[in-house]
Image (cartoon, rainbow, N blue to C red):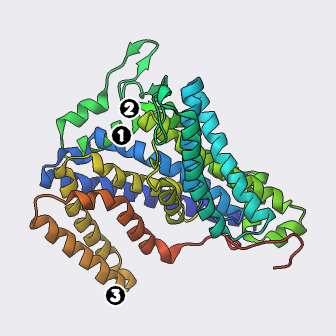
Amino acid sequence: MISTSAAARSAAQRVTLRNALIGGVGVLLLLSIVRYIANADDLTSSGAFEQALKSAVPILLAGLGGLYAERCGVVNIGLEGMMILGTWFGAWGGWMWGPWWGVAIGVAGGAAGGLIHAVATVTFNVDHIVSGVAINILGAGVARFLSSIAYTPETGGGVTQSPGVGGHIGVFSVPVLAGGDVFGWHSPDVLDWLDTKRWFFASDVAGVLHGLMANLSLLTILALALVPATWWLLWRTRFGLRLRSVGENPSAAESLGVAVYRMKYLGVVISGAFAGLSGAYIVLVTSGVYKESQTGGRGFIGLAAMIFGNWRPAGVLVGSGLFGFADALQTRNDASVHALLLFVGLAAGVGAVLVIRRRKALNIGLFAVVAAGAIAWYVTSDTVPPEFVYCTPYVVTLVVLAAAGQRLRPPAADGLRYRKGQIT
């Protein structure tokens, strides 16, 4: 029975991987077609995907943080406030002692926010949503108060901004493929050469891969490595099994000797640490300085990426990439943003064809309406209003969550209050 179950699980994983690869190739092919028709070379350039990766990493880290909390049964909408604490303490630590100290202190700041959330929800049984909202308000207030004390005009900072963080976190490029160095020798850059040729599909694939392999911050590499590390920890270790059991049925877990309160505390503090790392990343990699409100709601988008990913690390990665690409649109030229209307229209058309076999008239109709509207907008206009571009990440968040809502399966005890010894 065990071997049969393991074989079935392995077969399901292979099917999922195959479908993911087919989907990825399909998206790249569609982007290549749109780039060719619209003559929007920047749409699949290495610069576009390099910026998309930088935009996606903070969302990814926040989403992974939310995953740890909700897998132990605690809803954490306070990710935004914990990210704010991460930005402030990351900037302060980096200003005082250098960027890697900023990373460590930013993580500690976010973990402190997670600890407050754990005390409120686990020990005092406060409603999780109320506590999360309070953390968001507290994070912003604490950051402003500390700025007024630490960043005096003499330091070059102020109430809303820190001095510049000294030093920098190193970068890495893959040798040969992206022009990285090998023992002091600067290797060729094959993908960049292929990207500049602007050949159909081949250059588009090269541009995407180059953007994901060149000039990678070491902190970016760490963030990406945390995805498989999280999967291994939560699904392949005793700690992960206990943490997930607490989020599914805390009474049953307690009856088997699991320290429910301890696991909840660990899950929420780890969640805050990830959010703090996300905030430190924004300061130390993206901007080089702390600014008030610079998180820009990424904590909430990270929570949306976690939900879109069905409370699994790989899903969080995919959702973060989608939202990161939408966020990166603000830095691209008008032609590329306008070309995305055609991409949305064609993608919706493909979606309508794929759902025909399911015979769900409502879904087919929605896809058809989106396809017709996006293509009509593309044909009848030359640009996209900048106001729409700025709100694109949030619109994409709402649309994706609405579309994914039917297949979601959160932990069974997520958000429920629990008292030791209670029977559920």
The answer to the question of whether label 1 and label 2 lie on touching residues, with beta carbons closer than 8 A, is yes
Q: Position of residue 327 (x, y in %)?
A: 36, 52
Residue, disc 1 = 50
Residue type, label 2: Ala
- Left or right, residue 236 beside residue 182: right
Residue 186, given in percent of the width and then of the height, sits at: 36, 16
Say which mark, if any, is on residue 361. 3
Q: Distance between the residues labelled 1 and 2?
A: 8 Å
Q: Residue 214 carries which label?
A: 2
Vertical position of residue 233 compared to residue 382: above or below: above
Q: Earlier in the sequence, mark 3 or mark 1?
A: 1
Which badge, 1 or 2, is on the more N-terminal residue? 1
Task: Name the secondary structure under disc 3.
Answer: helix
| Dot 2: element | loop
Task: Give the residue at x 44% y 58%.
Answer: 20
Judging from the image, what secondary structure is the residue with disc 1 in? helix
> Residue at left 53%, top 35%?
91
Q: Indicate the position of residue 64 as horizontal and vertical percent values.
A: 58, 53
Residue type of the residue flagged with mark 1: Glu
